[in-house]
Image: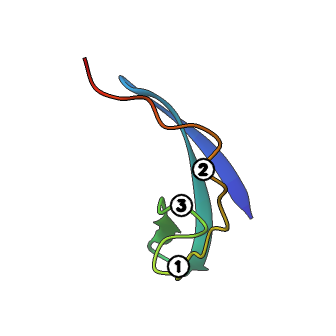
Amino acid sequence: MQLQARTPQGEVALIVTAIDDQAVTVDANHPLAGKDLVFDIEVVDIVKAA
């Protein structure tokens, strides 16, 4: 189950990871947190520093 929480910095998505008689546990990490990311990029221009 996914929830939205409001914070002074804006809305945060929360995933409910556990529910018991006394508590609800949520995870506010980004879904890609802890994963290895690989990007393919192409350099299209290089500008000499002024």
Q: CA distance from mark 2 to mark 3?
A: 28 Å
Q: Indicate left or right for 12 with 47 as reference.
A: right
Residue 16 is situated, as x and y percent measured from the top left of the image, at 61, 68
* Residue at the far top in the pictured view: 50
* Secondary structure found at label 3: loop
Q: Give me the residue at 65% from left, 42% from top.
A: 44
Label 2 sits on what residue type? Val
Q: Give me the residue at 58% from left, 37% from top.
A: 45
Label 1 sits on what residue type? Asp
Pick the front one: 34 or 41? 41
Q: Indicate left or right for 13 with 9 as reference.
A: right
Q: Nearer the viewer, mark 1 or mark 2?
A: 2
Label 3 sits on what residue type? His
Circle 2 residues within 10 Å: few <14, some 14–19, many ≥20: few
Say which label, 1 or 2, has the lower sequence index: 1
Image disc number at residue 43: 2
Say which label, 2 or 3, has the lower sequence index: 3
Q: Give me the residue at 67% from left, 67% from top.
A: 40
All told, the count of numbered labels is: 3
Pick the front one: 42 or 50? 50
Which residue position holds label 1? Answer: 21
Q: Nearer the viewer, mark 3 or mark 1?
A: 3
Quadrant containing the N terminus in the rendered view: bottom right
Image disc number at residue 30: 3
Say which label, 3 or 1, has the lower sequence index: 1
Residue 5 is situated, as x and y percent measured from the top left of the image, at 53, 39
